[in-house]
Image (spheres, rainbow, N blue to C red):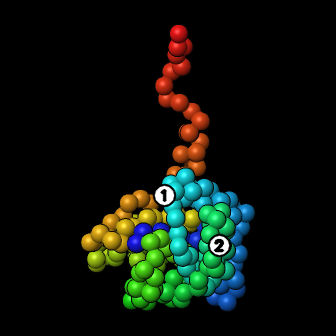
Amino acid sequence: MNLYLMRHANAGIPRENPVLDAKRSLVKEGKEQCMLMARVLNSLKVQVDVIVSSPLKRALQTAQFVGTELGFEGNVQISPALGIEGDYAAFQELLAEYADYEGMLAVGHNPNMFQYLGRLITGNGGAGIRMRKGSIARVDLSSHPPRLHWLIDPRMARSFYASVGKSSRPKTSRK
């Protein structure tokens, strides 16, 4: 299985009240991050068979926006394993539940997402991997140990898109 771990996009300033914080929506920049990262996934020809999200609004919105842009026609599944209170054991159960799928997009929060990623690829969580808001990592779970293929964040994606139109080669005439 190809697992795509995604941290939710920008939802503005966290609220002190946990009930209000759980209902925090994506801000304009967060919605733009979703569209940008979905374009990156499309350009990489990513195919997802299932999308699973944290139950919190900002993660669910991220999953829905990205899924729509990818042309995903199914429903986004909800799992507490991807929520703020999720733990690695619950995450492993989630992976086992969807093990028959070829591609899975899991949308959650930090610190869980980078901890899950670190434990997947090292076995002990020793990897110090930073996942900015909107970041996506591709992990091949079929190799042992699972292998990180790439990690792309919105800043990197923006710089890729900005440089695509520019050629580093000098223009020469062909006669």
Answer with left or right where residue 38 lies relative to residue 97: right
Task: Confirm whether residue 69 shows in the render.
Answer: yes
Alpha carbons under labels 1 and 2: distance apart: 24 Å
Q: Is residue 77 above or below residue 31?
A: below
Q: Is residue 13 above or below residue 79?
A: above
Q: Which residue is mark 1?
A: 152
Of the 4 image quadrants, the one containing the N terminus is: bottom left
User: Farthest residue in the right direction?
Assistant: 28
The residue depicted at 54 percent of the width and 89 percent of the height is 80
SS at badge 1: strand
Q: Position of residue 14 (x, y in %)?
A: 64, 76
The residue depicted at 34 percent of the width and 76 percent of the height is 119
SS at badge 2: loop
Q: Position of residue 109 (x, y in %)?
A: 53, 76
Q: Nearer the viewer, residue 2 or 120?
A: 2
Q: Nearer the viewer, residue 78 or 112?
A: 78
Residue 73, label in figure: 2
Q: Nearer the viewer, residue 107 or 174?
A: 174
Mark 1 or mark 2: which is in front? Answer: 2
Q: For residue 121, which quarter of the picture?
A: bottom left
Q: Position of residue 25 (x, y in %)?
A: 71, 75
Q: Is residue 174 above or below residue 154?
A: above
